[in-house]
Image: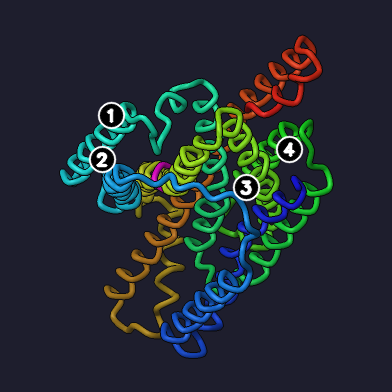
Amino acid sequence: MGNSIVVAFGLTQLPLPIAWLLSPALLDLGDWQTLYLFEFALAVCTLAAVVSLKLPPGIRIKVIERTDFLTFALVAPAFGLIAGVLAQGRLQWWSEQPWMAGALIAAMALLMIAFHIEHHRANPLIQTRWIGTAEVARFVIAALAFRLILSEQSFAAAGLLRTLGMGPDQFGLFYVVIIAGTLVGIAIGALTFGPKTMMPMAIAAVVLVLAASLTDSDATSDTRPNTMMVSQFMVAMAGALVMAPLILNGVMGALKRGPDHLVTFVVLFTMTQSAGGLLGPALYGTVQQYREHEYSGQLTAHVDPSKPVVAQRLAIQRQIYARQVTDPVLAGAQGTALLQQVTTREANVRAYNDIFRLNAAIAFVFLLWCLWRGGAQMRAARSAPPAATAAASSSM
């Protein structure tokens, strides 16, 4: 059963790269209408599969209460406000939009009201007392950290290549390699999965991301998709390896407390994955913009037209427009603008290299934490009776 779960959750990593492969061709066939028509067809096929492939009969218990709808009405907009701030923070900038502070205050107020209601209910939808335990704190840290370091692929690597002018035509083989890495990770995870291998799989995933980030941290303006395929293959493997152990750790911890804790786990897992998926671009995007401005200022400060090297470069840039622009003043202005574009590109490359190094540092700290947790589990397993050994491996 565990092997099937590895395959099932590993396959959830495939839609994004497949979409990047198919979307450009669909857009070429009929612009956005064809893409939306294809999306509608997929939704219809999914609905047909859900209706046709019914779940086996089981025990059905009526557990939904009226207060559950009130809790949902409070929690859902709170998560929506937080997601909106994370998505728009680096675009509208954090300190320049007062609505972001208001949105976060409103989100915290809604969550506090919802948790207060759930804490005093006889049959709560969200187990607030379980959320406050060290077990749940470890799960949340692990889930957020994994989503954050996996942003190395979705934000840093892809963002750097787009900054360097790569388009859909250049990304084709790139995403094929990512799909291959995901499939290899699924295969390895399914073949090696077991209660004793969950922590080693998580550690291996962190090591893969750490190695990939260090490999990508020396990118230049000549970097192309083919130069990053090995590193992105490793990140794709890591994403496929880690998902099933992470989910199973959380599910096993919830089931130990009782079936009524599964809803709380679903809420926690959804929250960490959604927030982590937005936190990566928000954090790394903010750092990238800040570092790009710093590097642009440093590079521009050294562009002095009186220096022979700079004057020679400006002359070369003017020659590019000499045949199209007869006015020497206008040709000189366009040559200077082209040099500024080159400066901005180099500043962006350096900023993305800082992102790769930052991701590597976070992965390294997370690796130390995983090794410490693994050591604690081994010590607990040696000192615990045989019946408790399996339970000890379910806590990350």
Q: Is residue 310 above or below residue 365?
A: below
| Camera-side residue of 181 and 268 | 268
Residue ID for mark 3: 216
> Looking at the rendering, in which quadrant would you find the C terminus?
top right
Q: Secondary structure at mark 2?
A: helix
* Disc 3 to disc 1: CB gap under 8 Å: no
Q: Earlier in the sequence, mark 3 or mark 2?
A: 2
Q: Secondary structure at mark 4?
A: helix
Residue ID for mark 4: 201
Residue ID for mark 1: 116
The x, y position of residue 94, in whole percent, is 26, 43
Q: Amino acid at mark 4?
A: Met
The x, y position of residue 59, in whole percent, is 59, 49
Q: CA distance from mark 3 to mark 1?
A: 46 Å
Q: Secondary structure at mark 1?
A: helix
Q: CA distance from mark 3 to mark 2?
A: 37 Å
The x, y position of residue 395, in whole percent, is 63, 26
User: Which residue does the image show at 30% across and 69% down from the upper left?
Assistant: 333
Q: Earlier in the sequence, mark 3 or mark 1?
A: 1
Q: Amino acid at mark 1?
A: His
Span shown in magenta? 281-285
Q: Amino acid at mark 2?
A: Ala
